[in-house]
Amino acid sequence: MTSLLNRIRARVAGEAAPDPDPLVTDLQAALAPDRVANDSAARSLLSHDASVFEGGNAGPICYPLTTDEVAHIMGIAERHGRAVVPRGAGTGLAGGAIPLGAPVVIAMTKMNHILDIDVANEIAWVEPGVINLDLTNHLRPRGYHFAPDPSSQQVCTIGGNVANNSGGPHCLAYGVTNAHVVALEVVTASGEILHLGGIEAEPPGYDLRGVFVGSEGTLGIATKVAVRLTRNRPAVRTLLLSFDSVRDAANTVSAVIAAGIVPAAMEVMDQRITVAVENYVHAGYPTDAAAVLLAEVDGLDEGIDIDADRIREIGEDNGATNVRLAADDTERALLWKGRKTAFGAIAQIAPDYYLHDTVVPRSKLADVLEQVYAIADKYELLVMNVFHAGDGNLHPLLIFDGREDGVLDRVHAAGGEIITASLDAGGVLSGEHGIGVEKQKFMDRMFTDDDLDHQNRVRKAFDPVCRSNPGKVMPTGHSCADIQQLRAVPKDIWG
Amino acid sequence: MTALLTNSDPVLAAFAEEIGADGPIAIEGKRTRWDIGGALHDSTRVLRAPAGVVEYVPEEMTVTVRAGTPVNELQAVLAADGQRTGLPERGGTVGGAIAVGHNDHRMLGRGAVRTSVLQVRYVSAEGRLVSGGGPTVKNVTGFDLPRLMAGSLGTLGCLAEFILRTNPVPAVSQWYCASDADPFLAYRAVLAPSAVLWDGAQTWAQLEGHGVDVASQAQALRAVGSFTEADAPAAPTGHRWSLRPSDLASIDGYETGAYTAVVGVGTVFAEKAQPQRRIDPAIAIVAQRVKDQYDPLGRLNPGRQVGGW
């Protein structure tokens, strides 16, 4: 939508045409009128992401096609004293893409080309708007894939994966996004175009690439990404283990790791979520088990049989009531479909859910899960657990109906206690969703003032006036000029 | 109290006290790579970091270790429980290996130094003890200070302690050697070699994993050359070059002298030095801003520079 359209509509409605906003005029001149949206519907839509956070307030939305256009947008925003917020598919769960203070939203979804697949160096250059699963599908015929596979991989973008240092079930063996990005072209808030990292063995200088990945759009915006290609494994075995208790499943996970086996993935689902999933996709999950463990090993045929047998034995030693090996690719795909659509399955139970994301030492999984159930009981909430057990990454889902009076207060209180329980067990605030606006207030539970000050120095080195995605990650009081930036534009300026 | 907020460790506090807040300071390990990044300014106070393995949790595959610990001591502790790290063993310390950030020549099998570091503790230019990262194997909480500190040559903070990710030692580890193989075909013939080295004549490949897999992969190697079992080659030495993996195919075009190249990675250990790589001027500006943020008075490892700008 363009402001021109708005004015025509206003004229049709008999209203006086509003004066064109000079910021929007400049952005339209730099891009194209149809790639700058400023109507209230678009701004309202992009004021949200997949998180539950309200209070977003998008300014004009730009859809650049090139790095130079992104640099132009940065320059225009700077001249008009506006912050910028990068955005991919908006699937983030920590509110990282929520615009605060009517910033210019830079939606990267039209920069969605796979630029070069360089098999000789086992990398691919892609634009940030490329969809995660599209990249993997594109690579498959060449025998490669992009290893990070978040549950949202059918819609989330590589740029979003870079911003959040995204994970996924198969990051247990292969590592999260930071291990799979070798170089980046980025534009900082002041319009500098930087080339971070490199495809040579050991790029010179500080590892600014490594710091940029996971910075949630606060250091700038990635415009090209060189991702590492992971060779497809010729063979895979997927095991489904059933247990009478979540504790047995968690102990099995811990014992597998302790035995020196690093499976490609180890995912646990409790009975409530398993039943929901089974009703939803009919994947063949046992609905009478208190917990199921989906364990996958990949590699060469004979070796993975050894690992699969060992996992079966360890499971049985820890009380597995049933162990099933997926018979073929169809069964395997169905089991994974169940796991990856778990969050969609929740809709049958209640209209709303709040998905948490903390990490605990693997040996503490069982204890912390018990606390999670107790916390949910205390706040009279339904909790379901489906999580990346192999690396201790918990994802408790608090299920509720937002129309119920006061329920959100209970959800937030329970969430706070879950975070506390995870930290007390020696864990961390986030395994893969990031901090965004969700967990800023907990940062000082994990870090001292000195620690936070040192994190903020990275921010200041890239973006001295904090115009890139202000109000995120760092808690208030630790984030340089964020507060001034947000105050510079009254919340209701865009109506 | 969470694991991260325990900045009251008396050993680290004493280290911070010793570093203080004034005057040029450098931390030495074993001086195995002392010349990297330039000559240390005279009159710089040189200290050693605390040493020792603080906590090793094999079932978590993590180890907490002080920076002054010799790498071989750390590896010996881990080996007793069937584990290892990605840090190269070059006679130096853990802190030195991470400050330099160079990967082991068997990086494909052991992982990169940078991805090994889950948490870092260092003493800042202001003499304060700072923690970055976290104790778990997966963590995206806040900015990734471990990445910044790995390879920073101690120019941003005095490295004191790390939590490192460990890996299981494979059941079988075997080197193979051939003098008639195309090293690039050998690299592609096997699924996940732990190392493929090439000196222009001979190709060495290290295969690791279950015995059955190593045997079948050795067969795959033999399809591209007369590979036979061999002792581990000596760790390559010489000047370190950093090239793109694809550049190794035209390595004769570089003035390396005698060399050992790490196929699939791009590192080359050569008789002659690589011409100095200058970082992009735009990056140099940001790098200087990073340095100014962490060390505004230039007291940390003065004379040393990371990457040259």
Image (cartoon, coloured by chain):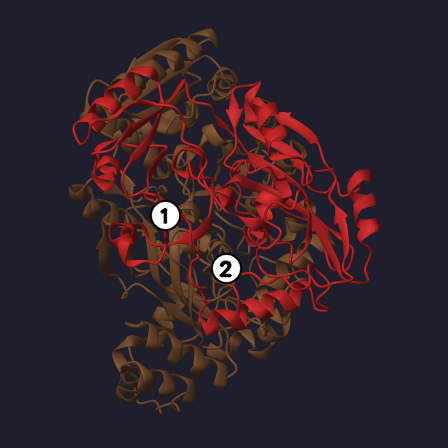
Chain colours: A brown, B red
Which numbered marker is on residue A16? none
Residue A235 lies in what quarter of the image? top left
| Pick the front one: A437 or A162 | A162
Q: Amino acid at mark 2?
A: Leu
Q: Residue at x 68, y 60 (%)?
A: B40
> Seen in the image, is A298 located left or right of residue B289?
left
Q: Amino acid at mark 1?
A: Ala
Which numbered marker is on residue B258? 1
| Pick the front one: A137 or A48 | A137
Same chain check for tags 2 and 1:
no
Task: Name the secondary structure under disc 1.
Answer: loop
Q: Chain of mark 2?
A: A
Residue A29 lies in what quarter of the image? bottom left
| Pick the front one: B68 or A136 | B68
Cβ–Cβ under 8 Å for marks 2 and 1: no
Quadrant in the picture for the N terminus of chain B = top right
Report which residue position mark 2 lands on.
A208
- Residue A347 is situated, as x and y percent measured from the top left of the image, at 36, 39
Is residue A238 depicted above or below B238 in this figure? above
- Residue A293 is situated, as x and y percent measured from the top left of the image, at 40, 21
Is residue B246 depicted above or below B72 in this figure? below
- Residue B127 is situated, as x and y percent measured from the top left of the image, at 78, 56
Is residue B266 depicted above or below B89 in this figure? below
What whole-number distance in Å separates the C-alpha atoms at marks 2 and 1?
33 Å
